[in-house]
Amino acid sequence: MSTSWQVSGVYAGERWTVVQSPSVAPDGWLSDEVSRLEELWTGTDKDEAAREVTEILNDTAELLADPSMVLALVHWPMSVPVPCRVRVAVADADALGLEEWRGLGYEVDEYPGSSLGPGIHCHATRDEVVHGWPVHVSTSIFAFTNAIGSVMLIVESGVRDAYLATLLEIPRLLSGLAVSREDGEAFVANPVAGVSRNQADEWGSVSNA
């Protein structure tokens, strides 16, 4: 996209890490976060957990080198260091339409509950090989579009339980998420043709207006 965007309204709990880009992270951020997370792992080898968490956070931080990625978070919903990654990305207004999402293997539903405005929820699973191991990856993409651009919140994990636990928290996250241009103009999504409901028409049909 041709403009810069800022993200606000994200209030992460103790089981969330807001990942810092290596270019702006303060000294000691990574080691401090690994130490903080140690309290979450019960019955787990602390040194091994620290190595796993460090690798996960470093891999996630590398994603922020992509200028389309404006926010990266890691959710740790389990008693072992198994993550679910959540990212916010921006794209052109015509990045992907309904048929393109479906053509990529996603099921598409309406998502009306975001502070960004009406959008869609695209969800799919796929098989991948990660570090030499077969992984069944679950992905949800919450996409919002207007005439200027698109905002996507991407949820992804190779562990089904971690993925489902994170999805339970996404409505809260999306209810506060705000994205704005560098000039301060807030992003507000347009209804999605063929998916978004017209609430005025629905009210009229119920009231026989």
Image (tube, grey):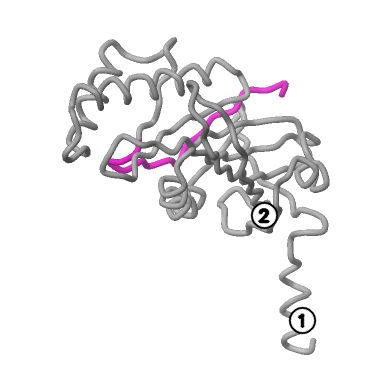
Which residue in the structure is indicated by mark 2? 118
Point out the residue furthest to the front here.
133
Q: Nearer the N terminus, badge 2 or badge 1?
A: 2
Residue 204 in the image: x percent, y percent?
77, 81
Q: Residue at x 73, y 44 (%)?
A: 105
Q: Nearer the viewer, residue 132 or 19?
A: 132
Residue at (21, 37) in percent of width and height: 41
Q: Quadrant of residue 25?
A: top left
Secondary element type, mark 2: loop
Residue kind at label 2, given as amino acid type: Pro
Mark number displayed over residue 179: none
Q: Quadrant of residue 137?
A: top right
Classify 10 Å Cα crowding around label 2: few (below 14), some (14-19), many (20 and above). Answer: many
Mostly what secondary structure, the magenta segment? loop
Q: Quadrant of residue 208?
A: bottom right
3 is within the stretch colored magenta: yes
* Horizontal and vertical percent position of residue 4: 62, 23
**Which quadrant: the N terminus?**
top right
The residue where tag 1 is placed is: 204
Q: Residues within 10 Å of mark 1 (few under 14, many from 20)?
A: few
Q: Quadrant of the C terminus?
A: bottom right
Query: Between 130 and 36, which is closer to the camera in this rendering?
Result: 130
Q: In this rendering, would 116 be left or right of 16?
A: right
In the image, residue 31 above or below residue 78: above
**Percent x, y of residue 73:** 43, 33
Numbered range of the magenta stretch: 1-16
* Secondary element at image label 1: helix
Residue 199, how many percent across, how many down? 71, 70
Q: Nearer the viewer, residue 137 or 53?
A: 137
Tag 1: amino acid: Gly
Q: CA distance from mark 2 to mark 1?
A: 20 Å
Residue placed at 74% from the left, 72% from the top?
Answer: 200
